[in-house]
Image (tube, grey):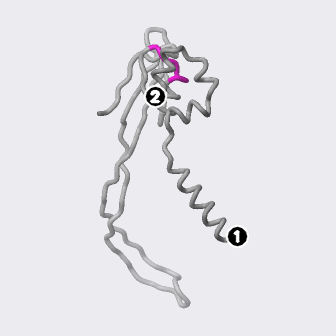
Amino acid sequence: MKRILTLLSLGLMCASCVPSTPQLRIQREPQKFAALSERHKAIVQQGQITRGMTPDAVYLAWNAPTRSFQGAQNGKITERWDYASSYPVQVTNFYGSYGYGYGRHGYSGWGFGIGPEIAYVPYRIASVWFIDNRVDAWERAK
């Protein structure tokens, strides 16, 4: 039984690391894919987007955005989808504290130190602009 639980948890960990692809999203959302034109279906299957696509088509091609913004321009409803990633950066932090109540008899005194940490800095990798629920423009980092 212990071996089965170990293998099951290992399998779940590996499955959670699998990236989402357009093909997986199409399998999960066949009704959204069926509603697309033949031209847009071919573009989505390649993981690409083009002007005139609906938000559903962009979702199937690129996945859900990290953030979205709504607005208006010339009397038309606009929306911007941003996609983000992050990169690790090593930082050094100084920390200090005054201890109290540790151990059997308590501890009283100052403690400090300097320690390295890893911080993750977010950055935008792509944006899609919609006007009236159609892609008007997009950009992606090279």
* Circles 2, 1 touching at the beta carbon (< 8 Å): no
Residue 120 drawn above or below residue 106: above
Q: Which residues are magenta?
A: 52-57
> Was residue 95 drawn as part of the magenta stretch in this picture?
no
In-image side of 136 versus 101 (left or right): left
Residue 6 drawn above or below residue 71: below
The Cα–Cα distance between marks 2 and 1, rounded to whole angstroms, is 46 Å
Residue most extreme to the right: 1
Image quarter hosting the N terminus:
bottom right
Q: Which residue is mark 2?
A: 81
Q: Residue at x 54, y 50 (%)?
A: 16
Q: Residue at x 50, y 47 (%)?
A: 18
Q: Quadrant of residue 89?
A: bottom left
Residue most extreme to the bottom: 105
Residue 49 drawn above or below residue 5: above
Q: Position of residue 58 (x, y in %)?
A: 49, 25
Q: Residue at x 38, y 44 (%)?
A: 122
Q: Position of residue 65 (x, y in %)?
A: 48, 33
Amino acid identity at mark 1: Met
Q: Camera-side residue: 82 or 6?
A: 6
State which tag comes first along the sequence, 2 or 1.
1
Q: Which mark is residue 1?
A: 1
Category of crowding for the residue at label 2, using alpha-carbon neighbours closer than 10 angstroms: few (below 14), some (14–19), many (at least 20) = many
What is the secondary structure assignment of the residue under circle 2?
strand
Q: How many marks?
A: 2
Q: Residue at x 55, y 51 (%)?
A: 15
Image quarter hosting the C terminus:
top left
